Amino acid sequence: MALLQVQDLLLSFSGLEVIRTLDFAVEEGSIASLIGPNGAGKTSVFNCLTGFYRPDAGIIRFAGKSLIGRKPHKITQAGMARTFQNLRLFKSMTVLENVMSGMHCRTSAGALGAVFQTGSQQREEIRIREVSEECLDIVGLLSKKEVYAGNLAYGDQRRVEWARALATRPKLLLLDEPAAGLNNDEKKALIALILRIRDTLGITILLIEHDMGLVMEVSEKITVIDYGRKIAEGTALEVQNNPKVIEAYLGSEEEGDFL
């Protein structure tokens, strides 16, 4: 069953098409990847999925419901969480506080409850802390929960962002260049984490990634786009041997990793 369905997606800026009648689907419980050379339109696709861009045409269905026209926070409430290629942490807040901020979309006590410290607000605060600590434990950062996010190493800051995304309780987790800036050991740990999130928490994962070794190892289905149009789709082996994919990557900086 497809958790996410994209059909005939079209996006343009000032008459320039950056996504061209794109079709793909992500099956519930799977790990899928969206890849392509620099400038292929991958991040634009993510921005359409998460409500940052409104496409010119096409269908985006998540859990059977249309996402077109929904605001980003409403899409998060619906069960789709996202990390970004560039870190977006509150660096003057602790690791735990950063993750707790991700649960804002799941809170219900309201402003009056916060002001008067009602029983329901206090219980909700305890629950937010518990869930946030669980998410930090999953990514291996529970011991650093009181450290200011800005004082962490880059790889650990990445993990804080993943934990914050998990705190929204997503059905689908979108990872935008999760391996960017990571060393080899951190990439190995990332692979294990992606598999653990899917296998232990049952969260479906869609990622954009330039590290082809990581993509080929974790992905059950790969969609390849070039100039905003799908040129191939299939398993890692099928994509690796597809002449159109090889041609798209020729001369790009990813060539050495891909071929």
Image (cartoon, rainbow, N blue to C red):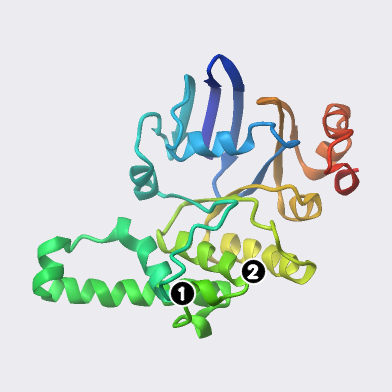
Q: Using a 10 Å C-alpha cutoff, classify the residue at mark 1 as few (fewer than 14 neighbours), some (14 to 19) or many (20 or more).
A: many
Residue 45 in which image quadrant:
top right
Q: Which mark is residue 216?
A: none
Report the quarter where the C terminus lies.
top right
Residue at the image position 72 percent from the left and 55 percent from the top: 218
Tag 2: residue type? Gly
Position of residue 177 in the picture relative to residue 66 (left or right): right
Image x and y of residue 171, in percent:
46, 52
SS at badge 1: helix
Vertical placement of residue 147 versus 182, above or below: below
Label 2 vs label 1: CA separation? 13 Å
Residue at the image position 81 percent from the left and 54 percent from the top: 213
Circles 2, 1 touching at the beta carbon (< 8 Å)? no
Image x and y of residue 143, in percent:
52, 85
Circle 1 is placed at which residue position? Answer: 95
Tag 1: residue type? Val
Residue nearer the viewer, 93 or 172: 93
Position of residue 104 in the picture relative to residue 53 (left or right): left
Residue at the image position 46 percent from the left and 80 percent from the top: 145
> Farthest bottom residue?
143
Circle 2 is placed at which residue position? Answer: 155
Which is nearer the N-term, disc 2 or disc 1? 1
Residue nearer the viewer, 206 or 26: 206
Residue 9 in which image quadrant:
top right
Image x and y of residue 53, in percent:
46, 32
Position of residue 227 in the picture relative to residue 241 (left or right): left
Residue at the image position 46 percent from the left and 40 percent from the top: 50
Image x and y of residue 249, in percent:
84, 34
